[in-house]
Amino acid sequence: MEVAGAGFLNFRLRVDAIQKALAGANRGEHLFFGRAEDPQTIVLDFSSPNVAKPMHVGHIRSTILGDCLARAHRLLGHRVITDNHIGDWGTQFGMLLFGWKTLLDKVALDRDPIAELERVYKAVNAKCDESRPDYDAATHETARAELVKLQGGDPGNIAIWREMIRLSQLQFDTIYGRLGVKFDHVLGESFYNSRLQAVVDELMARGIARESEGAKCVFSDGALPPKEDPFLIHRDGEWQPNPQLIQKRDGGFNYATTDLATLAYRLETWTPSEIIYVTDGRQQLHFQQVFSTFRRWHPERANTVKLVHVWFGSILGDNGKPLKTRSGENVKLAELLDEAEERAFKIVTEKSVNLPEPQRREIARVVGVGAVKYADLLPNRQTDYVFSWDKMLALNGNTAPYLQYAYARIQSILRKAGETSNLEHQTSNTQLEAPEELALARHLLNFGLVIEALAAEKRPNYLCNYLYELSSLFTRFYENCPVLKSEETTRTSRLTLCDLVARVIRQGLEILGIEVLDQM
Ligand code: ARG
């Protein structure tokens, strides 16, 4: 240890301490990270797409980010409960039911159910929107009547509604399968229907909500300075009320009402110490209001839980505007993944024509999906990022293929070494001498700190940058320190180091939800 100028202390790790840590990892005692001392129960609400609509790139960020947070917290030993809060209730079902009964094309429904439901929805919606030229009061009235019937439990409408959910869930499951994402629960919005009236009644009785223009709303209680108060908004030079709607004039409930009921249910059911919601940044005010209302409603219970909104920015196209297809539609997630795999397949084929096609397809799948995920996790989540195929699929640069390639390259070194010596008998001792070896080994030791920082701040980009640095340090090491051609002791030591780097890359990518390949 030494004093290094004003206010700084430098600590140097002794080489034998580093070697000891590496030996422990090599014996399988740890992989440079530890388990949490007091494991927490954490509820993670992410993905949460809407029924009868295709998942689009906006849902990709929530799904990928949320899954990564689940993986990181689990690895650290926490009890993670993932809950997909799908949008399976709301006014859109009035229109969907009417469309289902009058416009549905059964053949199209069999071919691509979500596309057909979307078509039907759009056609009816255009007639129910008073601001549109083809507004049709009769259609609007009928759609509303279908909704009332559904809400009243009409068996015919309930059956159709269930079928729409089933068809949507099939599509969601296909995509989750491709992304390797699983949920413990799928308690959609409709699950909370029977609890909503009680939420409103309690908030009214407690004076937290009151009537305003026929609707029921939560207003500011004045406890916070205006700048931090989500129930106030600065407009026309003054602070004005920005109420949270919990029951509409027609008796219908709002998105916020469902979230309040959901929060209460989760606390009762799982007693978590933290609940994490992963959505885009436009929902910030919504969650600030939900958390604040909940604290007023259940102050003691609110004290036992940390409520966190993990929000993210948009994915932009080349033009700097939110990513759309050429015809101005939302880009569909399934098509995006298809294109990623197709592009990766072309690249793999260019580079290794002689691999059998099934193997090239498998490489393309792992690389393509990995590239999309990594591109999403690498930027600071709160900034918008520009979607670029070329960038995310590049073999050099901070990309998934680069890291996957680094891993595959190490596997190839280990394979070659295995042909001439028995790796099982690798000694657990490394002898770190060259500066490149030391730099690489020291970086391995930081793995645990990075996972913990990722979990604490919900920022996967920390891990992306760590792995990129690790791979760069590995390249520098490999260029300067011969492995296979060294004499026996050095060779064994360096092979051990290679193996540990590969294991950390694989574990790190696994936290990011990205697969590796032994050969690319
Ligand atoms: N279904 C919503 C959407 O697509 C996201 C739901 C997020 N979770 C929640 N508890 N509000 O925007």
Image: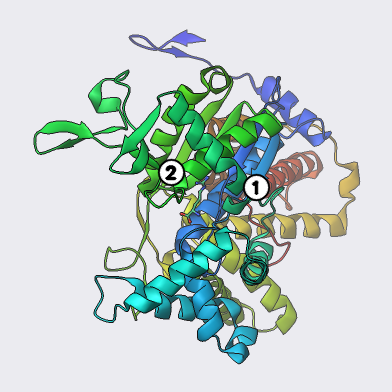
Residue 505 is tagged as 1
Farthest residue, direction bottom? 107
Q: Earlier in the sequence, mark 2 or mark 1?
A: 2
Q: Quadrant of residue 23?
A: top right
Between residue 479 and residue 276, name the one nearer to us: 276
Residue 460 is tagged as none
116 lies left or right of 329: right
**Can you see residue 343?**
no
What amino acid does circle 2 point to?
A: Trp
Mark 2 → mark 1, Cα distance in angstroms: 27 Å
**Image quarter (top left, top right, bottom left or bottom right) of the C terminus:** bottom right
43 lies left or right of 197: right
Q: Quadrant of residue 445?
A: top right
In percent of width and height, residue 5 lies at 35, 11
In percent of width and height, residue 469 lies at 52, 44
Residue marked by disc 2 = 311
What amino acid does circle 1 point to?
A: Ile
In percent of width and height, residue 456 lies at 54, 30
Q: Residue at x 27, y 70 (%)?
A: 130
Q: Residue at x 70, y 62 (%)?
A: 517
Image height of 258 relative to 78, above or below: below
Image height of 322 relative to 140, above or below: above
